Image (cartoon, rainbow, N blue to C red):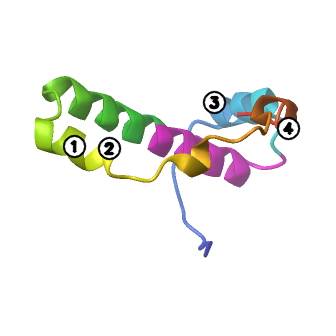
Amino acid sequence: MAREKATITLDRAKAAEARAIVGAASTSEVVDLALDHLIRSERLRGDIAAYRREPPTQSEVDLALLADSSDLADDTDWSALYADDTV
């Protein structure tokens, strides 16, 4: 991912607290992490809002059922494989 230098105004105390909480080495790392969290959160919020607006039509349900989901049924214990991963 391409990165570029930017000048921002922020509360240094908040940045220091966030850096300490997440164990980040720099304020840039904290800002990058915060933006990742914000983007993920807002995408999820948008998805939830879309689902709440109205239920899918029968044609949308039928279309979803056309997808091949056979690859999803395997014997892999994914929870065990990724037990040490953090979210």
Relative depth, front residue between 73 and 50: 73
Q: Where does label 4 land, which residue?
A: 81
Task: Give the side of residue 51 with respect to residue 78, left or right.
Answer: left
- State the residue at coordinates (38%, 52%): 67
- Which amino acid lies under the numbered mark 4 shown in the image of this protein? Leu
- Which amino acid lies under the numbered mark 2 shown in the image of this protein? Leu
Q: Does the magenta stretch include residue 81?
A: no
Q: Which of marks 3 and 1 is in front?
A: 1
- Disc 2 secondary structure class: helix
Q: Is residue 34 above or below residue 29?
A: above
Disc on the earlier residue, 2 or 4: 2
Q: Where does label 1 land, which residue?
A: 62
- Which amino acid lies under the numbered mark 3 shown in the image of this protein? Lys
Disc on the earlier residue, 2 or 3: 3
Circles 1, 2 touching at the beta carbon (< 8 Å): yes
Q: Nearer the viewer, mark 2 or mark 3?
A: 2
Q: In which quarter of the image is the N terminus?
A: bottom right
